[in-house]
Image (cartoon, rainbow, N blue to C red):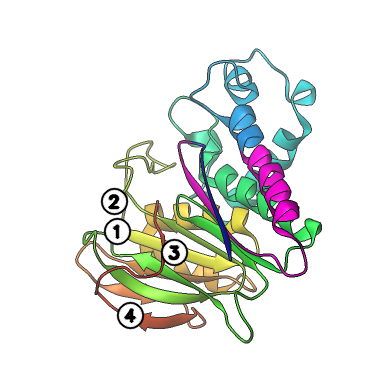
C-alpha cells in the first residue's frame, strides 16, 4: 500500500493506493497528477481566493460561458442535486451568493481518483476532509472499511461501514456552524452527523449536506435514489439509516480505521 498526504482545499487529502502491476515511480507520478487536479479545483472554485473564477463569477466580473469549462459541469451537478434534494441543497441560496462548496470537494476527489484508475492502479481510497471514494479491493476478497467519527467523542467511531464507492459525511462538529438552511438563510443542523454512500461522490457530498440541514425528513429521498444509502446521528444520540446502509459494526472505542467527518 502506497500512502500520500496532501494539504489542499483547506483540508488534508489522503491517498491509499494498491499499485497492482505498476511500479512505485509510476504510482507517484499518478499521485502528483491527481494532486494537481485537486489544487486546480481549489484554484477554480475557491470562494476565499478573490481572484478565483468562482469569486469573479459571484461578483459578476466573469460570465459563465467565459469561465473554465469545469464550472459549467459542476453547476449542472448542483442544479441536479438541488432538484433531487427538494431544495435542501441549494448553492444559489447561500449567504454571499452562489457557493457550490457542498458538492465541489466531492467532485474534485472523484476527478483525482479517476486519474489513478485511468493510470492503471489496482485499487485506491482517496479522502479529503470526510469526502472519500474508493475503487478496487485493498486485498484479495477484502472491502475498503471506513470509520465514521463519533460527532462528540473525538477518540471514538460511531460505526464502521464497508465502502464500494463513495462515502460523504457532513456535520458541524469539525468546522462549526457552516451549514445553512436554504429556505431561511440561517445556520442550521438538524442532526449531528449525516453520512451518504453511493456511486457518485459529488452527489453523495451534496446529499450529506442536505441531510445534515434537513434531518430525517429527507431520508426517504435517499431511499428513492438507486444505489444511495444514508446514516444519521441525532443530537441526542438517536440513529436512523436507510435499509441498505452497509453498516459493518457500531462501536464507540478508540479510532482504529479511516474516518469521515465534515
Can you identify the residue that label 1 sits on?
192
Mark 3: secondary structure: strand
**Viewed as shown, does residue 214 lie left or right of 154?**
right
What's the residue at 67%, 55% (across, down)?
Answer: 113
The image shows residue 20, relative to residue 68, as above or below, that is below
- Which label's residue is closer to the chain start, 3 or 4? 3
Q: Locate residue 223: give its quadrant.
A: bottom right
Q: Can residue 229 be seen in the rendering of this structure?
A: yes
- Which label's residue is closer to the chain start, 4 or 2? 2
Mark 3 surroundings: few (<14), some (14-19) or many (≥20) residues within 10 A: many
Cα–Cα span, label 1 and label 3:
10 Å
Q: Are marks 2 and 3 in contact (CB under 8 Å)?
A: no
**Viewed as shown, does residue 50 lie left or right of 151?**
right
Q: Residue 250 carries which label?
A: 4
Cα–Cα span, label 2 and label 3:
13 Å
Mark 1: secondary structure: loop
Q: Quadrant of the N terminus?
A: bottom right
Mark 1 surroundings: few (<14), some (14-19) or many (≥20) residues within 10 A: many
Cα–Cα span, label 2 and label 1:
7 Å
Amino acid at each position: 500500500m502506497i500512502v500520500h498526504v496532501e494539504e489542499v482545499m483547506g483540508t488534508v487529502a489522503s491517498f491509499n493506493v494498491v499499485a497492482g502491476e505498476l511500479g512505485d515511480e509510476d504510482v507517484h507520478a499518478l499521485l502528483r497528477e491527481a494532486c494537481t487536479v485537486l489544487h486546480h479545483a481549489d484554484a477554480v472554485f475557491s470562494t476565499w481566493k478573490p481572484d478565483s473564477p468562482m469569486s469573479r463569477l459571484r461578483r459578476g466580473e466573469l460570465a459563465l460561458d467565459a469561465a473554465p469549462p469545469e464550472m459549467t459541469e459542476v453547476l449542472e451537478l448542483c442544479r441536479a442535486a438541488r432538484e433531487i434534494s427538494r431544495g435542501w441543497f441549494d448553492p444559489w441560496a447561500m449567504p454571499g451568493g452562489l457557493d457550490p462548496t457542498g458538492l465541489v470537494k466531492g467532485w474534485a476527489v472523484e476527478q483525482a481518483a479517476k486519474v489513478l484508475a485511468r493510470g492503471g492502479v489496482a485499487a485506491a481510497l482517496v479522502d479529503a476532509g470526510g469526502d472519500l471514494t474508493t475503487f478496487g479491493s485493498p486485498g484479495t476478497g477484502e472491502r475498503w472499511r471506513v470509520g465514521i467519527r463519533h460527532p462528540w467523542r473525538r477518540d471514538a467511531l460511531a460505526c464502521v461501514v464497508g465502502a464500494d464507492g463513495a462515502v460523504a459525511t457532513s456535520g458541524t462538529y469539525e468546522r462549526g456552524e457552516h451549514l445553512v438552511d436554504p429556505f431561511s438563510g440561517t445556520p442550521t443542523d438538524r442532526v449531528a452527523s449525516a453520512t451518504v454512500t453511493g456511486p457518485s461522490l459529488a452527489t453523495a457530498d451534496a446529499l450529506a449536506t442536505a441531510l445534515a440541514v434537513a434531518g430525517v425528513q429527507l431520508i426517504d429521498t435517499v431511499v428513492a435514489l438507486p444505489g444511495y444509502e444514508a446514516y444519521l446521528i441525532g443530537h441526542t444520540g438517536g440513529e436512523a439509516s436507510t435499509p441498505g446502509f452497509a453498516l459493518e459494526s457500531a462501536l464507540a472505542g478508540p479510532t482504529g480505521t479511516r474516518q469521515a467527518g465534515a
